[in-house]
Amino acid sequence: MSVSIEKETAKELITFKLSHIQKEIHSILNKWEENNSDDFISKAKSGALENAEMDAISVRQLVADYKRLKDLLESIKSV
């Protein structure tokens, strides 16, 4: 199934979603008093941050989603 959407509308939707993802990542990092997602994931994985595993999994997925959407936005802008 495919859907047609105006380029500007697509850009606005993707930008909105990117902003939401960024806020979610910052919210989790603030909860653990961390500033960097890579450091947070490493600390959670090593056990330095006790009980942070589920949040680290969420952050890892959010970062992947952010990168995928950022690439999509760039591809739309270049067309």
Image: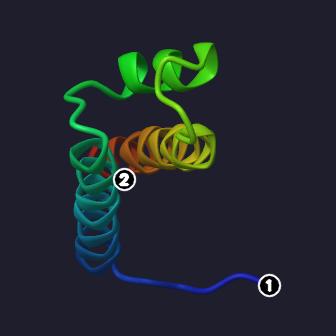
Furthest toward the front, the residue is 50
Dot 2 amino acid type: Ile
Residue at horizontal 62%, vertical 39%?
53
Furthest toward the right, the residue is 1
The x and y percentages for residue 70 are: 36, 44
The x and y percentages for residue 55 are: 52, 48
Residue at horizontal 62%, vertical 48%?
54
Residue at horizontal 26%, vertical 53%?
22
Q: Residues within 10 Å of mark 2 (few under 14, many from 20)?
A: few
Q: Which image quadrant for residue 21?
A: bottom left
Residue at horizontal 62%, vertical 42%?
57
Mark linked to residue 1: 1
Which residue lies under the disc numbered 2? 76
27 vs 6, left or right, is left
33 vs 66, left or right, is left
- Above or below for 58 versus 13: above
The x and y percentages for residue 11 are: 27, 66
Of 34 and 11, the residue lying toward us: 34
The x and y percentages for residue 15 are: 24, 63
Of 75 and 51, the residue lying toward us: 51
Q: Secondary structure at mark 2?
A: helix
Q: Which image quadrant for residue 29?
A: top left
Mark linked to residue 17: none
Structural distance between the alpha carbons of marks 2 and 1: 20 Å
- Above or below for 14 versus 40: below
Dot 1 amino acid type: Met
